[in-house]
Amino acid sequence: MVLLRGAHPAAVRPLVETLLEGHAPGDPEAPCVRVCFSPQELLDAPVGARVVLVGAERAPEWLNIHRPVVWERELVLLLWVDDDALERLRRNAPDFLDWVSHRIEVPWFAPEKAVAELQLALTRVKWIAVSGEELVVEASRGRRELDANRPYDDLAAAMDSGDVLVRRVETDDQLWRLMIAHAELRWRHRVVLAEPKVLPPFVVLISAGVEDWERLANRLEALGMENPRLVAALSDSPNEARGSRVRALTIDDTHMELLGRVAREQLDDASVSLARDLGLADVADALELATWSDERITPERLERSMSGGFRDRRAFARYALQVIVDVLLSGTAPVPSSSEDLQESVSTVFSRLLLDPQRLRGWDPEQAPSFERFLRELIEDLAAEATGFETKNAAEAASLSAPLPRRPSR
């Protein structure tokens, strides 16, 4: 008697294939293989049959009393049990379990068909959703794993470096962030969603689930099929129960307009406004920062950022901070002698820049077409003047920046 512990559904097919030794169900040359879904069915098993007993825990006391039937009928008995079933047998049929001669841990793995489908999808499509932890493990090989709650720029940077596997995709907002970041990267590389609760409309969903062995066998038996239990074990019929609980993302014209603008790299004020209207605050912040590039800055936009609201000022502040850090790290500007580290130096120069907006207003595109070059020269001057400089407004000015990591270059 063999104890098959684990009862993983994906192992049903290879188990029965092994017992049949390559023959099809009903083949007269095939070994005698039976599947029993209750202990009492052992009484009807042919002498010398190879029997897989599913549901032994349903009548443990009966098994304990009638255990001699296994030897009387010379059965090769394989007990298909999960951990809960095994514990019940230990409590209620200890004498029966004493006759177990071999114990085998059933491996936890994804069905071969699901793995083959996943491997094919990874060569042909950009968005894949996988259901079933064993299939998630397979999909994670060679891919960076991310949490959907990571900051937008972290997601974009990871997606820019290669294929990613994203866990905990639970809301529309999280999914839109991933879609927009992918659009900004012109759909490079692949995105694999692990056990998502919401799906985009263009995803391929692959499930590691298989249909319940007994339920499928009963349905085939009701249809009059021969050898329904063996046929059910060898079936590729998937279990759609898990996938059906996944909700599709609601797409409307506003969402599609934003996604289209980002995919075409139309990163302007309209894109930022659309993202904010949709409630995608971190996406809007990232897009707002992205629009602050040397070729997109105009005197009108610069003036609007200095005289506008908090968000306008913050967008410029984040852009300016990146330039300040780059200038100070490049060594083209002196570090103030009163600064003990780079962070203090950046804060000092940044404070002076924001507290003296007239210098920024002095930019003339006709004289200095590159605003970034103009800003770098201004920062070098401020760094040279900043020795010992401190201001009570430094903390307030720095709070406007809320700096994010530098977005990946395209």
Image (cartoon, rainbow, N blue to C red):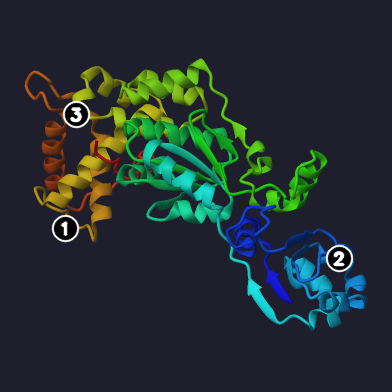
The quarter in which the C terminus is drawn is top left
Amino acid type of disc 2? Pro
Q: Give residue 167's position: percent from left, percent from top.
A: 51, 48
Q: Give residue 292's position: percent from left, percent from top.
A: 27, 29
Residue picked out by circle 3:
294
Instruction: Say what secondary structure mark 3 lies in.
Output: helix
Image disc number at residue 39: 2
Q: Is residue 403 among the parts visible in the rendering?
A: no
Q: Give residue 58's position: percent from left, percent from top.
A: 87, 63
Around disc 1, counting alpha carbons within 10 Å, would you say few (fewer than 14), some (14 to 19), or many (20 or more)? few
Amino acid type of disc 1? Ser
Around disc 3, counting alpha carbons within 10 Å, would you say few (fewer than 14), some (14 to 19), or many (20 or more)? few
Labels 1, 3: front one: 3
Q: Left or right: 79 with respect to 316? A: right
Looking at the image, which is closer to me, 209 or 337?
A: 209
Q: Give residue 108's position: percent from left, percent from top.
A: 59, 62
Q: CA distance from mark 2 to mark 3?
A: 77 Å
Labels 1, 2: front one: 2
Looking at the image, which is closer to me, 124 or 360?
A: 124
Question: Going 40% across and 47% down the picture, which residue do you hit?
Answer: 164
Q: CA distance from mark 1 to mark 2?
A: 85 Å
Looking at the image, which is closer to me, 13 or 228?
A: 228
Residue furthest to the left in view is 367
**Which mark sits nearer the N-terminus, 1 or 2?**
2
Image disc number at residue 337: 1
Question: Going 55% across and 47% down the picture, which residue do you hit?
Answer: 168
Q: Is residue 187 among the parts visible in the rendering?
A: yes
Question: Going 72% across and 50% down the picture, which residue do you hit?
Answer: 212
Q: CA distance from mark 1 to mark 3?
A: 31 Å
Q: Do the residues under discs 2 and 3 have CB atoms within 8 angstroms?
A: no
